[in-house]
Amino acid sequence: MTAVTDPAPAPVTRRPGRGTVAWPVVAGAWLLFVLSHTYLSGRAWWWNLPDLLPPVALLVVPLLLVVVVAVAVRRRARLVGLGLAVAALLLGWSGNGVVAATLWHRPPPAPADAVTVFAWNTWYWDELLAIGPDGERTRDPDRFYSYLHAQDADVYLLQEYLYLTPELDPLPVDGLDRLRREFPGFHVAAVGELVTVSRYPIVREHPVDLRPFLDRRWPDLPPADSRLPEYHTVKTLRTDLLVGGRVLSVYNSHLHVPMVGLPARRSDTADDTLARHDLRQADYRALAADVEDNPHPVLLAGDLNTSSAMRLLRTIPDRLVDASPALGSPYPVSWARYGLPLWRLDWLFTTDDVTVHRYLMVDPAGLSDHTGQLAVVSL
């Protein structure tokens, strides 16, 4: 008899698990997002929503992808997924808000003639951040000025010197007389919503008008019925201060807020996404043009309404140096949303002939949604 043998079993083909395929795809999608953000931020008006992401997302998301891919993905797909996640991490590094230099930067001690500067978005001057029981805004001028005095600064760069109507239109504040009484001997410059108060003489006052730098003309800029027209057209106030026989140019800035949403059907209004995109670019162009033509040492501080994730921040003139390493925090923040302090919108830059000896964010004590910036500098 002939022995009959059973046929050999067919080899089992294993299909890749869902995670093996899915996570590299997710890493690739994130890399594509970061590539798009790098190019479109500050260039395309319709990229306004991605521009608002917390900068730390550019760090946390790729790091999480690295961990998940390393644990859950097999073999070759793992290498692909890791490569994509690491590429996204490196590409987004400059915008993730991390200040690595704070780990080794040690500012030099301040000399006796150093200048203390305090820059702050006041939240509608002396109004409190808290809203009253019936939704009304409340004011506490005494508390406001006590807070300013507590900073013991030589120069104050204050923004939002205004109130708002129920329709959110800006109203002028009649507060300069009290400001001068509170700071006797100081010099005051004010335009629109910007106020600079200086112990040092102001030898030149220059509002930086953004209109010559717009891509197009907006007929309602400023609105014909505005009671504070400079609020719409001047977002930076330059004052030249005489400090120890030298001129220090101080720029007090509160740039336009990014607009969220789609453009209106009307294309001729400055209160719209398309116009706001143009206005923000003009803010930076106007500031850059003035700084580039300025032969003096420069200090720029204020609420730029721009996070590190936004490309517009990198259009700051090259001669200005970010003072962030002196903050002492690897992820400094100055503004919170939904109770999450994940954004930094307030910045301080100087030319390299201005030394920053101390720099810190100051809690606003319930008076504003922005932290203050206190810096000690010297020429």
Image: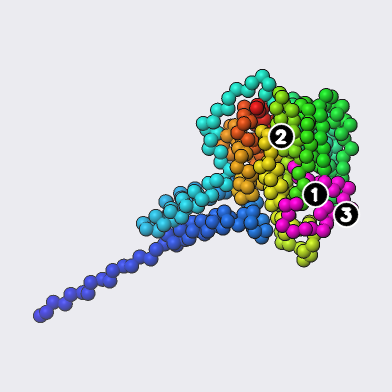
Q: Determine which quarter of the picture holds residue 18.
A: bottom left
Which element carries disc 1, helix, strand or loop? helix
Q: Earlier in the sequence, mark 1 or mark 3?
A: 3
Query: How far apart, in angstroms, are the residues tagged by discs 1 and 3?
Result: 11 Å
- Residue 185's x, y, as percent? 83, 24
Of the residues shown, which amino acid type is indicated by label 2? Ser
Q: Main secondary structure of the magenta part?
A: loop
Q: Nearer the viewer, residue 238 or 6?
A: 238
Question: Residue 249's mark?
Answer: 2
- Residue 343's x, y, as percent? 64, 44
From the image, tell me which residue sits under label 1.
232
Q: Earlier in the sequence, mark 3 or mark 2?
A: 3
Q: Determine which quarter of the picture holds residue 161.
A: top right
Q: Nearer the viewer, residue 252 or 72?
A: 252
- Give the left or right position of residue 63, taking residue 319 as reference: left
Q: Nearer the viewer, residue 164 or 104?
A: 104
Task: Tell me if I can see residue 215 in this picture.
Answer: yes
Magenta region: which residues? Answer: 212-236
Question: Residue 32's mark?
Answer: none
Of the residues shown, which amino acid type is indicated by label 3? Ala
- Residue 314's x, y, as percent? 61, 46
- Give the left or right position of residue 17, taking residue 291 as reference: left
- Give the left or right position of residue 282, taking residue 98 as reference: right
Q: Residue at x 40, y 58 (%)?
A: 77
Q: Residues within 10 Å of mark 1 (few under 14, many from 20)?
A: many
Q: Nearer the viewer, residue 204 or 37?
A: 204
Name the image quarter holding the N terminus: bottom left
Q: Earlier in the sequence, mark 1 or mark 2?
A: 1
